[in-house]
Image: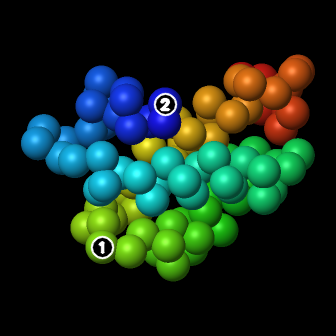
Amino acid sequence: TYWKNNFSKQKYVEQNAGYASYQPAYRTGYEGRGRYPGRTFEEVETDLQRDYEHSKGSSTLTWDKAKRATRSAWDRVERAMPGDADGDGR
């Protein structure tokens, strides 16, 4: 719900883009954070890209454009966890 209500406020979102274009990237980020515990985004970026490519459905976003949304969702989950769960200092 958070991303659906706030995606349009993100600087990386292309003008006139709908939530449906970014939803798979957000899902990749928030699910990926749980799928790869204790690892940094950078350590698993290749895996996340693969996950996104397999689950993006009809979204036309390339990984280069989806990556920032994926990272935003990853970081949001990270901030909700106590401490610095992945050890990246964020």
Place residue 47 in its image quadrant.
bottom right
Mark on residue 58? Answer: 1
Tell me if I can see residue 14 in this picture.
yes
At mark 2, the secondary structure is helix
Give the side of residue 78 with respect to residue 27, left or right: right
Q: Which mark is residue 35?
A: none
At mark 1, the secondary structure is loop
The 10 Å Cα crowd at callout 2, few under 14, some 14 to 19, many 20 or more, is few
**What residue would you read off at disc 2?**
2
Identified at 63% across, 41% down, the residue is: 74
- Is 24 in front, or is 39? 24
Q: Which amino acid does label 2 sit on?
A: Tyr
Would you identify the image quadrant in which residue 81 lies? top right
Residue 19 percent across, percent down from the top left: 30, 46
Q: Is residue 68 above or below residue 51?
A: above
Q: In this view, does 1 lie above or below 66?
A: above
Label 1 neighbour load within 10 Å: few <14, some 14-19, many 20+: few
Q: Which residue is drawn at 45% across and 59% down?
A: 24
Q: Quadrant of the C terminus?
A: top right
Residue 71: % across, % down: 54, 42
Q: Quadrant of residue 14?
A: top left
Look at discs 2 and 1 and give the one toward the viewer. 2
Residue reaching furthest bottom?
54
- Looking at the image, residue 37 sits to the left or right of residue 78; the answer is right
> Which residue is outermost to the left?
16
Report the label total: 2
Q: Up-down: is 15 above or below 26? A: above
